[in-house]
Amino acid sequence: MIGYALRRLAITLPVLVVISFGTFWAAGQISSPSAQLTLNPRISPEAKQAYIELLGLDQPLHVQYGKWLGNFVSGDFGTSLVRNGQDVWPFVERALANTLLLVAAAVSLSLLIGLAVGTVSAIRRGSLWDYGSVTVSFLGISIPVFWLGLMLQLFFGLYLANWLGVGPPLLPTAGIYSPGQQGFDLVDRVRHLVLPTMALSLQLVAVYSRYMRASMLEVMSADYIRTARSKGLRESRVVVRHGMRSALVPVTTQAAIDIGQLVGGLIVTERVFQYPGMGLLFLESLEGGDYTILLPTVMITAVAVFSLNLVADLLYGVLDPRVRLGRGRRPVRRG
Amino acid sequence: MISVLIGIILLASACGNGDEAEPALSGPSAESGTPTTTAGGPTDDGDAASAEPPAPDKPAGDPADEAAALEETSAAETAGTQSEVAAEDRPGGELILAVEQWPECLNPVTSCANSTWMIWSVATHLLPSLMELDPDNAYRPSPTLLEEPTLENGGLAVGDDGTFTLTYRLNPEAVWSDGTPFTSTDVWFTWRARLDTDGTLSTIGYELISDIDTSDPHAAVVTFPEPYAPWRDLFGFVLPAHALGPDTNIAGQWNDHIPVSGGPWLQQSWSQDQHVLVPNDNYWVPERRPLVDRVVMVPREDTDSEVVALQTGEVMAAFPQPFPGAVQRLTGDLTFVGGGGTYLEGLWINQNAPDRRFEVTKNVRQAVAYALDRQLIAEVALGSIIEDPLVLQCAGWNPTVGEWCKDDFTHYSQNLEKVTELLSGEGWSRPDPSGLWVNADGTELVLQWNTVAGNKRREDVQALVSEMTAPFGIGWEIINYDAGELFQNRLPVMNFGPVALYASGTSPDPSVQTIYDIEGIPTEANGFTGQNFTAYASQEASDLAADIDRQVDAEARLALVHELGAILAEDVPWIPLYLLPNLLVWNSSLVEGPGAYTFSVYGGFKDIYDWRVIG
């Protein structure tokens, strides 16, 4: 396992370097690091020169890249000229924490519902429940998040409160705290997580339930399940202990991959719900031409995707003993 | 395991609650990065003034100690006295407002101030000005002044040697929120901070000042080497010298908190999540004392979500960019006022465009103007937002302010004969009567046209104009960019067009030198620092624009403006289309009072001190 992880890392690192260089080049094309120097001609020559030297703007591209990469790897994200010289890291840190919270909430909720729905659908294959869940799943996969987000906002923020004849919205439609909230309030924070989590979860539930259903159908027809039943085990024990455990493997690995992709990919959800996470930060730095925030945002997303893909692969080996990572051999069945 | 992770993250975020004074994020400026005419060109500080600061009214202490003392004072005010005053005088309540573009930082001198919303949501409520604008964008003395400087009262004077002296008589009752008197030292400090701060956004006008005499704390005597007519635009905000000094380079200060106020409000907190204002009980203007106990501004950057938040009552008012379908969507308890505006949208023609296939001569520019139905364009762009959108008939002045804007462009309406006459006169021909004009080199009359990608209003205009000009033999190649790319990377270095559709901010003062000054054409030689983005190189117009800035007499100045207007209508450096309206929306079941400042340069929230929470 360790050898496999190291080999994967050895492959991943060069890919990350290539991605980082591509990102560095592309970000420079979209949002020039020297744009602010041009826009603010009254920056003193000393300050301008210091900034140029800091970023190596007078150097060839590969030298600039080397400087940036060195700083990035050592945790020095620099300062943002667009944001008047403020440190970049607090912006990224805060956005990352918010996004991780949202992703964790959405993925855990989706796993909970998706696994249950998929399992029941598999057990009751061909039933009304099965057809119903398939239909809902396809709907969930098809509905765009921006539309779903707005509908959730209208339903929970406006229509439901009107129907029930209550004054304020049942759930806040945007932000992470109620306006005017001072200090940390767990209930308020969780209430603001509900709608973005729901918007994000619908697609994930649909995907996980489909994965779980297919996986359960395959597992439940396996020989060892028949053996378990023939030994007289209760059906619930057969399903939960023997069936679900094996069927979980593809869903769990899919969830790990999703977490990586969602870390930087919640642009629409975060925009609609004004949720200050990585997606919103990326969008705002892109629109504002903030090169210094754009780069670490993209790179952290790339690192998250690669890391969690690796975690997914490793999990695969842990959860399914038939898989022997890195041995290059097919799993051997023993009877 | 994931639940544990959520728990850990929740705990972690408890340590970083949203009410911390963290800086926030936003797009560049109003109208998705619309460039304004506020950025200054390079100047020579050394020649402008003495480096010696005037004697302060009180001994300058350690700024850090002063800031600490101030924080204590502010906290004490907020905790104690204020609540008593609130109980007696204020109807109370909490006003919640939506802010469409959250400022990145708050320093009012640096690029932070390039965000219009920094002015609208922060500076205008906290920082006092000398002259100010009324709701109709006409200048008047602010409460910091006893009177407007005029020639009659000696506030304005032109010496025999041509020097121009401007005397601001300061209101002795004016004080900062910490009780420190508002004095001429503050005016001096603001002037120096504008010039000395690294990355200062604009030095326009300030670099022309040769000295400010502060010997009388209640009179700031500003001296220019020659008359400076747009003086009313200066000191749109004044900084507290006692809180920010003695160093006049304030680049590193006030990024995320403005602890001292000279306006009706005091900033309680500002973060990425919200901006909280409470009444400044040391404000000396009784009629502007706030009626509510607290104002909370929250970011709502997506227009659809902003409207939902208004409908649900989560926010009580918003000042959104005009959006298509506003009339249909803003119904029920939502009341809105649309119109006025301070941004002029038009077709800006870059005569130095690197991608031009032919010289975009005066005849070509006029021909394009004669191929447009500008009334129809305005209706398509703004018809779903306001009734009777205002078509611009002058190239530089806001038609709703003063008498500066004459009807110089009214003769530009669709006229095929004129187009034919103008283009034929320069050797263009139209081999196919239904096709494009072709010049002697065989190049078709196709103009590259840029605007902000995804801006539906502007893309609608592009589609309409493409159809509209086809019968006139004029074609377009549309290449759009995101706002950052267009306004930060391309516009400053003249790498656009030849045609770009965008809006330019205006000042109520008729000064237009920034956009018509020949020296202001961005070039490699001047480090691309000017803002004459059309590369319009008329010496006559440039000189007139400079004369307008030197003419102090109002009538003579108006005549100069009209003279320049006629030249611009003849030369067509850009084709004015329409005035971009402002839109103020509020939930009338929750708040009353909004609307007076809808058309104001300060934004629709300027008079929130007069708003009342109901329901």
Image (cartoon, coloured by chain):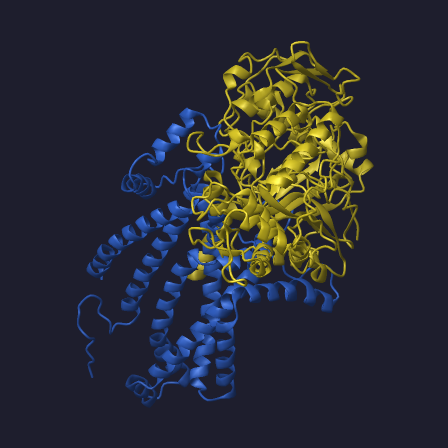
Q: Judge whether A186 appears above or below A50 on screen.
A: below
Q: Judge whether A168 appears above or below B46 on screen.
A: below
Q: Judge whether B334 appears above or below B270 on screen.
A: below
| Badge count | 0
In the image, the chain rendered in blue is A
Residues B575 and A318: in front is B575
Image quadrant where residue A172 sits: bottom right
Residue at point 46% right, 43% down?
B353
In the rendered image of this protein, which colour is used for chain B? yellow
Image quadrant where residue A308 sits: bottom left
| Left/right of residue A206 with respect to residue B262 in the rendered view | left
The answer, for residue B238, to whether it is visible in the render is no
The answer, for residue B299, to whether it is visible in the render is yes
Image quadrant where residue B140 sits: top right
Residue B410: x %, y % from top left = 70, 47
Residue B495: x %, y % from top left = 45, 43
| Left/right of residue B479 with respect to residue B307 in the rendered view | left
- Position of the N terminus of chain B, as image quadrant, is bottom left
| Left/right of residue B117 with respect to residue B607 in the rendered view | left
Residues B528 and B581: in front is B528
Residue A203: x %, y % from top left = 48, 69
Residue B318: x %, y % from top left = 68, 50
Residues A249 and B269: in front is B269
